[in-house]
Amino acid sequence: MIALLFSAAVLLAWLLLFLARGGFWRADQRLGSGSLTDWPAVTAVVPARNEAEGIAACVRGILCQDYPGELRLIVIDDQSSDATAQLARHAAAELDAAGRLTVLAGQGLPEGWAGKVWAMAQGVTAAGDEVPYLWFTDADIVHPPRVLRNLVAKAESERRVLVSLMVRLSCRGLWERWLIPPFLFFFQKLYPFPWVNDPRRRLAGAAGGCMLVARTALAASGGLTAMRSALIDDCTLAAQLKRQGSIWLGLAEESYSLREYTRLGEIWRMVARSAYVQLDFRPARLFVATGTMLFLYLAPWLLLLIGLWRGQTAVWLMALLSLLLSWRLFWPTLRHCGLSPFWVLTLQPAAWLYTLMTLDSARRHYAGRGGAWKGRTYAAPRGR
């Protein structure tokens, strides 16, 4: 009886995700193209700390934008120990666009600030108060020539204070194919894009690799100072800006990340640095998150085996339906990543690994190594 109730509950949970979670699984929120008669000025802001490997391609992608309005680029060299600044200048010089690039030497990190947010804040200050839009993008992202044109058209035509794209992540290696599509699937499940894009809902989310922000809305929201300690800067900024107006989040068609994850440890560290932050450093939320992941992604397999072993047809049949439904929901994300249907079988094992990463994130926090990234370690906010 217990197995029967559990199998029915798991199937019901997946039916609710299918029918009542904003259709997140469709992965259909795309930017599209647009046109304006008057194109506002934009300043791109790129925080860069030890990004020598990708900064040149990033700079070229921004300065080669087919954008009718004024476009300038500010790279904040966040105390890099490599040739990030020199490579950025060289890339601009090769394009004869050195006059549109400013490379700032990042100042020391003040107390209470997260490193990336502090670098972004310095870029915002340097951009000045007159530019209508700020385009935050990471130093390992390459954008096609028309992406800024489409971002601005979306913001202007729909009166959005934030337009953000989840850029394409590398899915070439074995670990990337196994773990990156589930990462994207879980993100969409946590922040259903259609709900994020609905002005009537409070849910807010963004992807830090590409965020076009209306400067006046940012200033009215308190600026980056209001979120200075945020370790998950993109979603924090989205929540802050949605109180000022509507926002939009979608999947990029062509913008892509240069960062590759060839080993499990690289993905593990990426997740472990922020997973417990996402849970607001609360043990109760960690318990609920862990239980939910096990319920959705481990229980169906266990119930399938129990049902087959005991000859309980209803148990194993409902467990199998849960698995089939989860794979159906996962398929559009795999298709977006350019992978075959075979990879649906990796969803559950990937979820088990991500659960372990989340638990490790909490362990690292209590060991005093939480939020470690690029040589910096951040403690939880006071009161946590």
Image (cartoon, grey):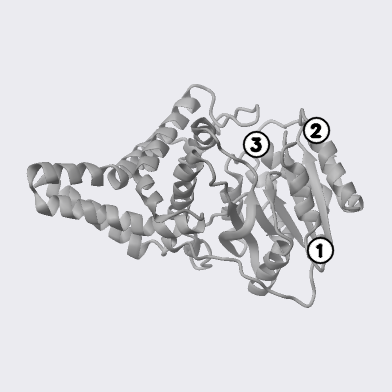
Say what amino acid the circle numbered 1 marks.
Answer: Ala
- Look at 81% across and 60% down and name the residue there: 131
Residue 55 in percent (x, y) is at 75, 42
Which tag, 3 or 1, sits closer to the chain's start? 1
Residue 147 in percent (x, y) is at 69, 62
Residue 370 in percent (x, y) is at 53, 29
Mark seen at residue 114: 3
The answer to whether residue 350 is left or right of residue 123 is left
Which tag, 3 or 2, sits closer to the chain's start? 2
Is residue 218 in sight in this rendering? yes
Q: Residues within 10 Å of mark 2 (few under 14, many from 20)?
A: some
Instruction: Determine which residue is flagged by label 1.
Output: 41
Quadrant of the image occupied by residue 153: bottom right
Residue furthest toward the bottom?
A: 37
Q: Are marks 3 and 1 in contact (CB under 8 Å)?
A: no
The answer to whether residue 17 is left or right of residue 304 is right
- Considering only vertical position in the picture, is 226 above or below 71? above
- Look at 81% across and 55% down and name the residue there: 63
Is residue 209 in sight in this rendering? no
Q: CA distance from mark 3 to mark 2?
A: 23 Å
Q: CA distance from mark 3 to mark 1?
A: 28 Å
Q: Choose between 60 and 80: the one closer to the eye.
A: 60
The answer to whether residue 324 is left or right of residue 281 is left
- Considering only vertical position in the picture, is 118 above or below 256? above
Say what amino acid the circle numbered 3 marks.
Answer: Ala
- Look at 34% across and 44% down and name the residue there: 348
Residue 364 in percent (x, y) is at 49, 26
Q: CA distance from mark 2 to mark 1?
A: 29 Å
- Considering only vertical position in the picture, is 185 above or below 52? below
Mark seen at residue 356: none
- What secondary structure is marked by label 3? loop
Say what amino acid the circle numbered 2 marks.
Answer: Ala
